[in-house]
Amino acid sequence: MDINDGAAANSSFTSKILSNMAKFSNSEKKVAEWIVRNPERICDMSMIEIANQSGVSDATVLRFCRKSGFKGFFDLKISSIREDSDSSKLVYQGVTPEDSTEKIAKKVFQSNIKALEDTISVMDFKAFDKAVRFIQKSNHILMIGVGTSGPIIKDMYNKFLRLGVSCKAESDSYLQLMEVSLMEKDDLVIAVSQSGSSVDPVDTLREAKQIGANTVVITGSRYSPLTKYADVVLQSISSETRPETISSRIAQNSIVDALYVAVAMRNLDKSVENEKKIWKTILCKTV
């Protein structure tokens, strides 16, 4: 089968890949050939799954994406789906306008469950333990995230504040840099970014490393620009193709919850004492 036989259904997308064939290494050509022949399958697969189908490493898939002119694997998926006749995938993958509301609800729940199962299956528990130790020993923690990562860092702040941890959650790009510029060596920056390619968190983490701060990244892309400045990477997994993913946020919130509980258990007496103080203070706010 000629490689061009698979290009007809998605000509603009596959033409971009074919035009860069001369740049690819032999292993990258394997990725190109598989994608050109299977463009309709990309939106349902992770980078690791495509690597396995192509017989290469996931790092090779990422290099292929960048040599093809895409910012990364996520950009590749979005570019492929833009030319797909099924525009509903941009809203939520696997759901159609013909589905009943019951079916839609079940599909969303199932996708969230799968994201949790996939995330725990790839969890690096040595990295997780290292993140817990960073949190325990840090004098101050800065939590950063932009866009839909903002609510995750605010929830993280709420949890770690209860433990008596000196911390701050910041979603403003200018304030992130101002905050990190005043940090000291062995302070901690935790960045949340699904794509790992948002400019502001990358700039902030780069600055954090220059001053000697420790860094933890929670992301859906292990080989993104953000992870270059990470001491610890905690990866979430989601097969969604929409720009602002839904189920990945469930997985990332669960990573935050796990960090909170692990740190609390390492200093249980203080954690319990703080919870009692908090509830005594806010009791007047309840009806």
Image: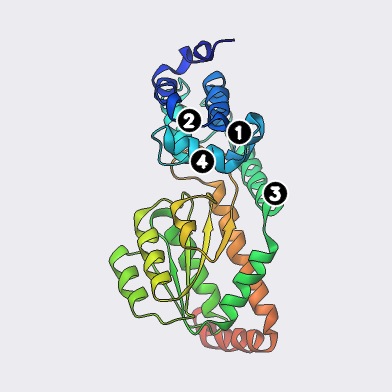
Q: Does label 4 or label 3 sit earlier along the sequence?
A: 4
Q: Secondary structure at mark 2?
A: loop
1 and 4 marks in contact (CB < 8 Å): no
The residue drawn where x is 59% and y is 52% is: 236
Task: Kindly report which numbered mark, 4 or 2, lies closer to the viewer in this rendering.
Answer: 2
- N-terminal of the pair, mark 2 or mark 1, is 2
Amino acid type shown at disc 2: Phe
| On screen, residue 202 above or below 183 | above
The residue wearing badge 3 is: 117
Q: Secondary structure at mark 4?
A: helix
Q: Amino acid at mark 1?
A: Ile
Can residue 45 be spotted in the picture? Answer: yes
Question: In the rendered structure, which amino acid carries the disc numbered 3?
Answer: Glu
Q: Which mark is residue 62?
A: 4
The image's mark for residue 24 is 2
Q: Position of residue 264 (x, y in %)?
A: 65, 79
Residue labelled with disc 1? 50
CA neighbours of label 1 inside 10 A, class few (<14), some (14 to 19), many (20+): many
Q: Nearer the viewer, mark 1 or mark 4?
A: 4
Name the spot of residue 122 as percent of width and height, x first: 68, 52
- Distance between the alpha carbons at the discs numbered 3 and 2: 34 Å
Q: Quadrant of residue 71?
A: top left
